[in-house]
Image (cartoon, rainbow, N blue to C red):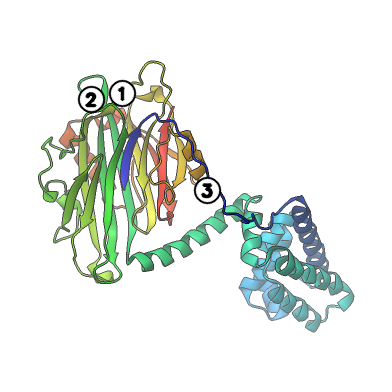
């Protein structure tokens, strides 16, 4: 679920298409022009038709009452016209059939057909664009999302919601909130970093009997000693119970099975039933002293990065990084998202993994200096969790600056990384 990486590795990857494989239709400049022209005609036609309806622009309630429409449809029509931009109009417009209902309602209310003919023609063109040029409305939305930021944000959220529903049912498990919080602190030896992960799954439950619930912490590093995960008080992990922060877990405390495999520690949730009533909260901490080198080898240009891996379908991912004031010269991290389905977890220092980067509208927010203001609307006990960690480790909470990436309906199998140059 959460990882730390600091490796330099070169490599190349080539993909060979099967003989005769085609690339399919391409949305080129001509299609862009057709979409813009269709949007312009919709704007002009609907605007002219609405001008003939008394009080049409007062608001959706007035328009709905005047034409006998439902308020939602009336609101979408007004937003389409008010957008003023052809691409935004395409994004906001209802489908051709609902638009035709609006025009018929106008005529029934006494609007002369000479005022609605342009709208009828524009709606017919809108339907041809959807049916003949792009295939369906969903495909058109995907194209427009590349050009209109608000359209893209809405498009991504809806698709991620759909993916969450499908994958949670297929995997047989889901969580309300996936928490991944990491502390980076100079190690006592002065040459390496202590890395402490606080992992949590809230509202975690199986949707069907026997579904597996697994997550992991990993290290991607070279020329470094074998991993030695410890509890917050410095004891080598002997059993899963030692890792749990029981005061923040459900009662009875959920059981975890722990397996160390190379540079990974795999955690498996023990069976505690299924269905919403079996939902549990799991919070555990893993401390790794001297986990990675603090400084790069001479002549080596590499990034230091931490990342969360979405291994459980979840409604929210809250990924926080708390960096000691002596690290990275006060620089802020960049955010990178990777598709892990092809080559697994990505090493950000491997140029070949650029092919797997996902272009999505997620971002990193600075939480400022000190942990006293680091709250969470998704995790009510978050402030207490952070205080517990700092008190146990004897770290001053005021010496850390925080960063947060919060993702609604994070895509299953995505690697979300923060990186420092």
Q: Residues within 10 Å of mark 2 (few under 14, many from 20)?
A: some
Visible in this render: residue 127?
A: yes
Quick check: 307 above or below 200?
above
Residue 81 spot, x, y in % from top left: 73, 62
Please give the name of the residue rendered at 65% of the width and 51% of the height, measured from the top-left corner. Answer: 148
- In the drawing, does residue 52 fall left or right of residue 82? right
Q: What element does badge 1 sit on?
A: loop
Question: In the rendered image, which quarter is residue 60 located in?
Answer: bottom right
**Secondary element at tag 3:** loop
Q: Which residue is mark 1?
A: 294
Q: Earlier in the sequence, mark 2 or mark 3?
A: 2
Find disc 3 in the rendering and name its residue.
Answer: 360
Res 84 visible: no
CA gap between label 3 and label 1 equals: 30 Å
- How many labels were placed on the picture? 3
CB atoms of marks 2 and 1 within 8 Å: yes
The answer to whether marks 2 and 3 mark residues whose Cβ atoms lie closer than 8 Å is no
């Amino acid at each position: 679920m959460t990882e730390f990486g600091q490796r330099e590795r070169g490599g190349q990857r080539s993909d060979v298409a099967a003989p005769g494989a085609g690339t399919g239709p391409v949305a080129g400049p001509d299609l862009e022009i057709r979409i813009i022209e269709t949007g312009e005609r919709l704007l002009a036609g609907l605007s002219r038709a609405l001008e003939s309806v008394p009080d049409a622009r007062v608001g959706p309630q007035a328009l709905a009452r005047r034409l006998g429409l439902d308020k939602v449809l009336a609101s979408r029509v007004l937003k389409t016209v008010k957008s003023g931009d052809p691409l935004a109009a395409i994004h906001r417009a209802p489908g051709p059939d609902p638009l035709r209902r609006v025009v018929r309602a106008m005529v029934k209310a006494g609007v002369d057909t000479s005022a609605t003919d342009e709208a009828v023609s524009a709606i017919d063109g809108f339907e041809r664009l959807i049916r003949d040029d792009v295939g369906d409305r969903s495909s058109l939305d995907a194209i427009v999302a590349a050009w209109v930021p608000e359209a893209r944000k809405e498009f991504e959220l809806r698709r991620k919601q759909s993916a969450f529903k499908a994958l949670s049912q297929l995997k047989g498990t889901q969580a309300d909130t996936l928490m991944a919080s990491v502390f980076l602190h100079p190690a006592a030896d002065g040459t390496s970093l202590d890395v402490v992960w606080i992992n949590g799954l809230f509202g975690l439950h199986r949707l069907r009997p026997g579904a597996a619930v697994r997550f992991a912490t990993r290290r991607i590093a070279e020329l470094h000693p074998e991993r030695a995960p410890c509890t917050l008080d410095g004891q080598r992990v002997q059993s899963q119970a030692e890792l749990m922060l029981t005061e923040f877990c459900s009662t009875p405390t959920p059981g975890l099975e722990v397996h160390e495999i190379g540079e990974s520690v795999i955690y498996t949730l023990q069976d505690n039933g299924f269905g919403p009533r079996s939902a549990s909260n799991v919070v555990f901490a893993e401390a790794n002293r001297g986990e990675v080198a603090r400084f790069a080898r001479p002549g080596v240009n590499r990034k230091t990065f931490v990342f969360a891996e979405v291994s459980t379908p979840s409604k929210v991912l809250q990924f926080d990084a708390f960096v000691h004031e002596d690290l990275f010269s006060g620089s802020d991290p960049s955010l990178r998202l990777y598709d892990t389905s092809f080559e697994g977890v990505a090493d950000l220092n491997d140029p070949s993994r650029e092919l797997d980067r996902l272009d999505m509208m997620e971002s990193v927010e600075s939480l400022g200096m000190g942990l006293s203001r680091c709250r969470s609307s998704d995790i009510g006990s978050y402030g207490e969790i952070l205080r517990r960690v700092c008190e146990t480790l004897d770290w001053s909470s005021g010496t850390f600056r925080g960063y947060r990436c919060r993702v609604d309906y994070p895509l299953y199998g995505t690697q979300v990384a923060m990186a420092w140059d």
